Image (cartoon, rainbow, N blue to C red):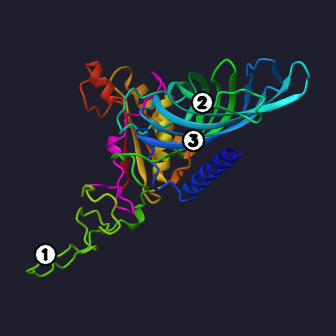
Amino acid sequence: MKRKITLLALLSSTLLNAWIASARGEDEVDYNLASRFYAGAGLGIARLAPDVSGASTKDETGIGYSLHFGYDISERFSIEGAIADLGDVTLESDSTQQDIGSLDYFQYGISGLGYFYNSHGFSGSSSEESPYQLRSGISLYGRLGLSAMDISSSSSNLNIDGSPDIKLFGSGGLEYGWSSGYTARAELTSFSTDVQMLSLGFSKRFGGARSSISQTPHNTEQKAPPPTAKKPEPKASVSTPALSTDLDGDGINNNIDRCPDTPATATMVNSYGCHLDLAKLPAIKFQTGSAELTQKSQALLAWLARRLQDFPTTKLDVHAHTDGQGDTDANQRLSERRAEAVVNYLIAKGVSAKRLTAVGFGESQPIADNSTSEGRQRNRRVEFHVAE
C-alpha cells in the first residue's frame, strides 16, 4: 500500500510540473529534438497470469499506472527509465475454490526506443539546425530493455521469492506529438509470458541545447537603436560593467539579454536579445513539378509559424524561384504558385495574411549554373525576406 501511495504521489507531481511548465508558456522550450529530457505517466490494463502450483487466478486483469523519464539521443533513438505498479491478481485454491491471497506486481527498468516511422519524415541528420526534427505528428516505435519484476504476496500461504526477477522485455507503440513538446502514446508491452500490459500515456519534453535557429521567444516591438551611453571616467580600481550596457549592439541591455553575442546585422531581434536567422532555415521543397509541399517542409513551416508569433510586427516577403529547365512562362507560373503555397500554409498555421507577401521570380534570378544538377537544385529555392 505504501508503494502505491508513493507512486501516486510521484504521478501527481509529474502532472503538476507539466501543467506549470505549460502555464509558463514556451519561453524555455527548444523546438529542436536534439538533447531533450522528457517525463511522463501512463495508465493501463495488465494481463497477470502467474504460474502457481495448486492455484489459479480469479481474474487475470490488473489496472496499472506508471512513470517514465527519458532522454532523446537523436531523432530516431531515445533511452528511457520507468517504474510501474501493474496491479494485483487474486488466487484461489484449485481444490477448495477458496481465495488464498493475492499477488501485487511492481516493475522498474530501463530500455531503448527506436523510431522507425514519422509522418513528417526524418531529416537524416543530427544537426541542431534542423527545426523540423520535432518529435511531432504520428510516430511508430519499438522498445527493448531490461525489467526487474518485484512480486509481493498478501498471504503466507503463497510461497513467493521476494527477490526481483530481471528479464529482457519488448514493446511496440504508436505516438502522437505536438510541437509544444507534449506527446501521447499507446503501447503494448510484454514483460514475460505471464505479464503483458496495454497502456495509454503522455510525455512532456523540456527544452534542450539551443541553436542559432531555435531561440527563446522574440518580439521586435522593443527593438530600438543602441542607446548612447556616456563612457565612465577611468578609475584606479577595476569596475564592474554597468548592467545597462549593450555589448552586442542589438538594442537590448545586457541585464535582460539572453543572447549576448547577437550579430549587429540581425534584422529580427526579440525583447530578450535573441534573433531568428531566416537565411539558415533548411530548404523548402515541393513535389516534383508542382506546388505541393513535402511533409518535411510542412513541418518546417509549422515550426516557422510558431516562431513568427514571437515577431508580431515583422512582415515577410516570400520569394520562390525555379531552375532554367522547361518553358519560361510555365516556370514563372510555377514559382508564383509555390510562393502562394508557402504563404497559405503559414496563414493556415496562424500567421496573419497582412504580414505575408508571395512573389514568384521564375527562372529570372539564378544563383548557380543551370547546366548542372547541383546548380539547378540550388536555383529551385524559397527565400524569406524581412519587408521594409
Which label sits on residue 238? Answer: 1
Q: CA distance from mark 1 to mark 2?
A: 64 Å
Magenta segment includes 283: yes
In-front residue for pair 162/19: 162
Circle nearer the viewer, 1 or 3 = 1
Q: CA distance from mark 1 to mark 3?
A: 50 Å
Circle nearer the viewer, 3 or 2 = 2
Question: Percent position (x, y) of residue 348?
Answer: 57, 44
Question: Percent position (x, y) of residue 78?
Answer: 47, 32
Which label sits on residue 163? Answer: 2
Q: Which residues are magenta?
A: 266-292
Residue in view at x 42 percent, y 50 percent: 316
Q: Which residue is mark 3?
A: 178
Q: Earlier in the sequence, mark 1 or mark 3?
A: 3
Residue in view at x 81 percent, y 21 percent: 55
Q: Secondary structure at mark 1?
A: loop
In the rendered view, does 341 fall on the left or right side of 247? right
Residue in view at x 11 percent, y 79 percent: 237
Callout 3 amino acid: Trp
